[in-house]
Amino acid sequence: MPAQAVSFALFLFCYYAHAGTFSTYASLFFAAKGMSVAQIGVLMSLIQVMRIFGPNVWGYVADHSERRVFVLRLTGIAALTALSGFFFGTAFAHLFAAMVLLNLFTSAQGPICEALMMSEMRGDLSYYGRIRLWGSIGFILSVMGAAFVLDQYGVLALPWVAGALLVCVLLAALRLKEVPRIPHAGPPPVLMQVLRKREVQMFFLSTALMVAAHMAVYTFYSLYLERHGYSKAVIGAMWSLGVTAEVLLFYFQGNMMRRWGARKMMYLALGVAALRFAMIGSLADSLAWLVVAQVLHAATFALHHSAAVTTMQRWFAGPLQARGQALYISLSYGLGGSLGSLFLTRCWENLGPASVYYVAAGLAALAAAAAMLCFRFQRLDA
């Protein structure tokens, strides 16, 4: 177990408590501010758009200064300052600017913390899931707690809740200590040479398509359930159910990877994702089927994420680890997530809310095809 396991777990708990609460209820906050569905789609897509830039900008600063913990603290202070923009102003342009600033700083914090964890683990990911699950637990508790606060005080209280959680993120960053990067014998691998490999390109295409499909959940799920008559308490409970399943899978992730391997787990996650999104689109009036679909989040997020992180070690271990993590977030969650959110917004407007989930099922199927090519190219190029 890493020496800073408790500190890493605390930081991830607070970070995902904020990230989960804000992403879950922000669409409802923007609707209360008078934004249209199209404007909400654009504003929510900024969470993913800034993942293209934030992790790379702050990852570069952290790597070249070799002060990653300092960067976590700096971005924590900056994020709190940026959040103040949500307390005043109702124009679309004002909220757009506030979202850009807030997510420019918060988007880098998760990848930098994970880079610190992997440096301390020195390539042994046996305990990765058991530390990462505390982020999911923070998500659950915060989303459930925020549901009751927002039901009591209204959804416009969201900035106060988010601000309190960002203070906790900053306090958790103060506990962390710097971890020396793993020394590399011989010349380090060239990043562009790795990115030119066709299996790497297919890997990032697959993960980008999978994240694009998940924008049906991350951007529209709360609004979708509200349109079907579910209360904020039910919406919060559904989010928490999915993340509870995620926590359990993260706990057993190490054993599953050792027994069946990343390739089989990746295929399973992608197949389950296509089924899950189709269920949400066609069975939204049945709470029981929605519960089943949310339990499948364990496979579509936690299992897929674990399989992806394990697969990446083939190309991005050692001196490329931090940049590989940044690229994974930027290309998959940033580029894939932002394009997916915008595309699915057009589907919502032109084809109706349910179409978003049918299209997401198709994107998951395409992600499975790209993953098959990735592993096939690995075998051919080995």
Image (cartoon, rainbow, N blue to C red):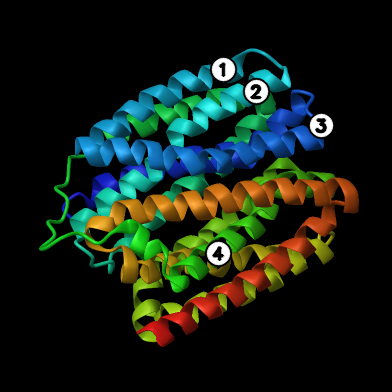
How packed mark 4 is, by other alpha carbons closer than 10 Å (few <14, some 14-19, many 20 or more), is many
Image check: 61 left or right of 279?
left
**Sequence-earlier tag: 4 or 1:** 1
Which dot marks residue 191? none
Check if mark 4's residue and mark 3's residue have beta carbons within 8 Å: no
Which residue is label 3 attached to? 36
Disc nearest the viewer among 4 and 3 = 4
Q: Residue at x 71, y 17 (%)?
A: 90
Q: Position of residue 66 (x, y in %)?
A: 19, 39
Which label was assigned to residue 85?
Answer: 1
Between discs 2 and 1, the one toward the N terminus: 1
**Marks 2 and 3, how far apart in space?**
13 Å
Between label 4 and label 1, give the one nearer the viewer: 4
Q: Which residue is mark 2?
A: 95
Q: Secondary structure at mark 2?
A: helix
CA separation in Å, label 2 and label 1: 8 Å
- Identified by mark 3, the residue type is Ser
Three-letter code, disc 4: Leu
Question: Observer-nearest residue: 33 or 347?
Answer: 347
Q: Is residue 290 left or right of residue 304?
A: right
Whichever of callouts 3 and 1 sits on the residue coming sooner in the sequence is 3
* Residue located 37% across and 28% down the image: 76
Instruction: Tell me if label 2 and label 1 are in contact, CB under 8 Å.
Output: yes
CA distance for labels 4 and 3:
31 Å
- Indicate which disc residue 205 carries: 4
In the image, residue 87 above or below residue 117: above
- Is residue 293 placed above or below 53 in the rendered structure? below
Residue extending farthest right: 351
Badge 2 amino acid:
Leu
Tell which circle, 4 or 2, labels the residue nearer the N-terminal end: 2
